[in-house]
Amino acid sequence: MAIWLDINPRSGVPLYVQIVGQIRHAIEVGALQAGDQLPTVRQLATELTIAPNTIVKAYNELQTMQLVESRAGVGTVVIASSDEMTRARQVEAIRGRLGAVVRDASGLGVEADVLDAFYADEVERYYGEQGE
Amino acid sequence: MVTTQEKAIAHPVELGDSAIEIKDLVVNYGSKRAVDRLTLSVPKGSVYGFLGPNGAGKTTTIKTLLGFRRPDAGSATVLGYDIVANSVELRARTGYVSEVNSLYDSLTVGQMNDFCRSTARQWNQAAVDRYIKMFNLPEQVRVRQLSKGMGRQLAFSLAMGSDPDLLILDEPTSGLDPIARHELLNRLVGEIASEGKTVFFSSHILSEVEAVADWIGIIKAGHLVVSDELDHLKQNQKVLKLVYTEPPTAQELDVLKAMPGVGRIEQEGRSVRAMVDGDAEALARSIQASGLNLRDIDVVGLNLEDLFLEYMKEDESGY
């Protein structure tokens, strides 16, 4: 099950960050799909020979990221699909573009309320049209 | 019959989330101070790697924790038991495997097992049998004929007989070949720590500690240098590598030193290496934005060996 996890303890990257990154990647590429069960903490600790608490920490992080869910009597289950994650990344990218626009505006000396008005206009124009 | 008084002693003091709590511990060896005001706490359920150069006081600390040596000052509790007043109780709840184990050479593996069972207050033979079988230890063979690795495996198996909540291991893998070492560490994390038991082990093999430990403590000359979650250390202790366009002036270095989180600095020509405590990436961004005359800036993560060496250097300059 955990064969695709390739953990390097001798790296400067924290172990739990490596685990989170690799499981996240596996979900993104579809190697893990919604409903798939992750190994138990004990199984993974034994397989990788790393402290169980490190795995608990990684699973908690994945849960906070809403990629997995802990179900009583079942274990840790993948809930995100690669489609959702792609979408989440796209939304994140839009957020980033907004940030860049605000920075540029501030660099040009545009006042915050003016920028707010611009933004409201754009939102109104697009979402308003859609509603009609 | 158990008297009320005995019951009161047997009941461990509530201590929250620590399996071991050491406070200002001092242990002298003749005129030499082996443990020097050591303060340390080991969280329950952790796999805690206790590190330090040879002669740093690791073994002395462990022996004192188990009540084999009396502290000269300070105090400590193990599983809530005071190490001086309740050392018998404490040892009944703690499994201990030392570098040199007191196994009786002329006994067979089976006889050794019987002996331990007869002296123990409580005994889980099923657990011992499971480990003896797992390690393929021959019951009829005398202890003296066992290899070093098998001796260690036997000591480990017997330590599990008292069903301990805490396992204290002094250099558990020294002298073991890589396969036996991996197998032992694997049992430690897969079976012992997975059951919520605490594992406290000393070692100077940093690579094995880095793999299995989630907490580490480093001591040097009997005092604590650092105790923290290993992943937390790796996340927060990084090195910033700066390459200036011209060798930086003392003034420029002072500017760098005054930045938040910047610790020890090393300079060699145009290159500067700075230890950073905290968000090194954010610091790198703000340095870049501040318009210093830089050719290059880079954040480098540290593995345990790098961290260990950094702490040793920092300690030298600090004391």
Image (cartoon, coloured by chain):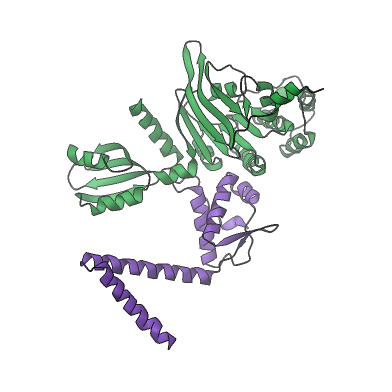
Chain colours: A purple, B green
Whether residue B110 sits left or right of residue A98 in the image: it is right
User: Compared with residue B64, is residue B262 higher up or lower down, i.e. above or below?
Assistant: below
Pick the front one: B166 or B186 = B166
Q: Is residue A131 visible?
A: yes
The quadrant in which the C terminus of chain B is found is top left
- Name the residue: 52% across, 55% down: A20
Pick the front one: A108 or B227 = A108
The percent coordinates of residue A60 (x first, y second) are 56, 54
Q: In this view, which residue lies farthest toward the top?
A: B30
Q: Tell me where residue B158 sits by quadrant.
A: top right
The percent coordinates of residue B238 (x first, y second) are 38, 44
User: Compared with residue A117, is residue B307 higher up or lower down, i.e. above or below?
Assistant: above
User: Compared with residue A100, is residue B41 higher up or lower down, i.e. above or below?
Assistant: above
The quadrant in which the N terminus of chain B is found is top right
The percent coordinates of residue B207 (x first, y second) are 50, 39
Q: Is residue A10 visible?
A: no
Whether residue B174 sits left or right of residue B141 in the image: it is left
Q: In this view, which residue lies farthest toward the right?
A: B1
User: Compared with residue B76, is residue B197 higher up or lower down, i.e. above or below?
Assistant: below
- Name the residue: 43% across, 46% down: B235
The percent coordinates of residue B285 (x first, y second) are 30, 53
Whether residue A17 sits left or right of residue A125 in the image: it is right
Q: How many marks are shown on the rendered structure?
A: 0
